[in-house]
Image: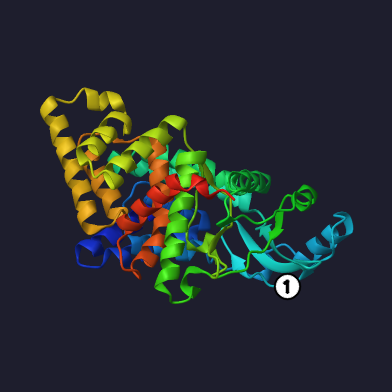
Amino acid sequence: MFIIPTVLYAFWQYGWYCLGRSRLDCMRNMTKYLYHKNIVFSKLFQNMSIAINILSKEEIELLYSYNEHVPFTLNELYDIQIIMDDLNIHSGKDKIILTSPLPCKSGMISVVYYATMGEQDIVIKVKRPNITIQLLEGLNEFKRLIQWIQYLPYLYEFDLLTIYHENTTDMINQVDFKNEINNLISIQHNFKNIKYVVIPTVYPIFTSLNDNIIVMERLIGNKLQDISINTRLYEQYILLLFKLTIKSLLYDGCYHGDLHTGNIIFLSEEEPKIGLIDFGIIGRITRESQNNFYNFMKASLLDKDFDKASYIVTTHMLHPPSNYNELSLLTKQTILKDIINILKNTELTGTFDIQFMYNLNHVLYKHKLSLDRDFCKIQLSMLISFSVTDVLCKKCDNTFIHYFSQALVEFFNDELNLE
């Protein structure tokens, strides 16, 4: 009873779009529809839409607004006081005292409470009851929907089932709190000597007692909208965010997979630092992909050698490579020329954003090509985090490309900012 009504509703919204309704309004209506069917659907819709680069920045923000502030009623949640009493009896740690019996944040997977443990401010992340069953049921229904629509015009180009399976793994991992703790510890190790990145201390003992919760240090700072109005401060935070991204991708091969504004805390304006939270999704890429990505960024952003950057894309970043190799010389030259024009336009506008990704994919899809999966993962991660830096860049005197290029140069000249 989900597939046919959903397909009909999607066509209904498409009809209104053809009659002049804005795409953003149609997206809002579609998201509301999916959200009320099952909150899992709207999250999957968000992840897959971003993964295939069909959204504008405003549409990405719309989807995040739905999925990062999920309504709840208290009778839908675990009794937090019972959980606290049990932990206080068995953990051997200082007594946990809730700041409020009401959650301060609510997402699709969990709700979050503020508390103290001795003199330490902490957060307690509590899984929603039955979310695993709800998630698996939603994933199965969504898969059947994709099997219906994947051959429709335009959509068949995107290899939706592959993207679905990649997102399925990530979403299932999000409900495994032991996995999230391991992710946090891994990222914390990678940044242990980096003075400008703060990862909260986690207390695995509590999750070993109750695998529906995570207890960790509370990072107290500002959200994006609360930063003091100060151009110099904006520029410092921009460079730190870019360096964080560069280190994760080019040095560690391991990166935060959901680095949107809700998961970034801006700390210590006197000595700016970036705090990261929510490690349900992390991504990993191979050393070969790291090298290819570095060479592409260096050629396009630092050296302004767009011919070389275009060549790197076509020789190292396409899937399947056999499809490209079988094209005629004239077609290959056309693709190279189109990519060069996209890169030149990026340089002129000073932006490296959703439009760049969309234009690049559009050129490839015309020839039944796509970017390889590692580069797509990098794209997705960067698009999410760049939506934050884009806001800050617009408040400063220089362009996105200027600051990213500056961060690249500084990163490789400062010995990774080791203390």
Q: Position of residue 159 (x, y in %)?
A: 35, 38
Q: Position of residue 129 (x, y in %)?
A: 67, 57
| Residue 155 placement, left or right of 274 | left
Residue 256 appears anywhere in the view: no
Residue sitting at x 44%, y 51%: 47
* Mark 1: amino acid: Pro
Find residue 64 and report its image quarter: bottom left
SS at badge 1: loop
Q: Residues within 10 Å of mark 1 (few under 14, many from 20)?
A: some
Considering only vertical position in the picture, is 237 above or below 170? below
Give the answer, above or below, for where 93 lies relative to 163: below
Q: Residue 229: x percent and y percent?
A: 43, 77
- Depth check: 212 or 118 in front? 118
Q: How many marks?
A: 1
Left or right? Give the position of 110 relative to 381.
right
* 294 relative position to 256: left or right: left
> Which residue is tagged 1?
101
Instruction: Residue at 59%, 57% (x, y): give it.
Output: 277
In-image side of 11 versus 410 (left or right): left
* Along the viewing direction, whichever of 110 and 404 lies nearer the viewer: 404
Q: Nearer the viewer, residue 370 or 407?
A: 407
Which residue appears at 32% of the width and 39% of the height?
296
Measuring from the top left, give residue 409's x and y in whole percent. Answer: 38, 48
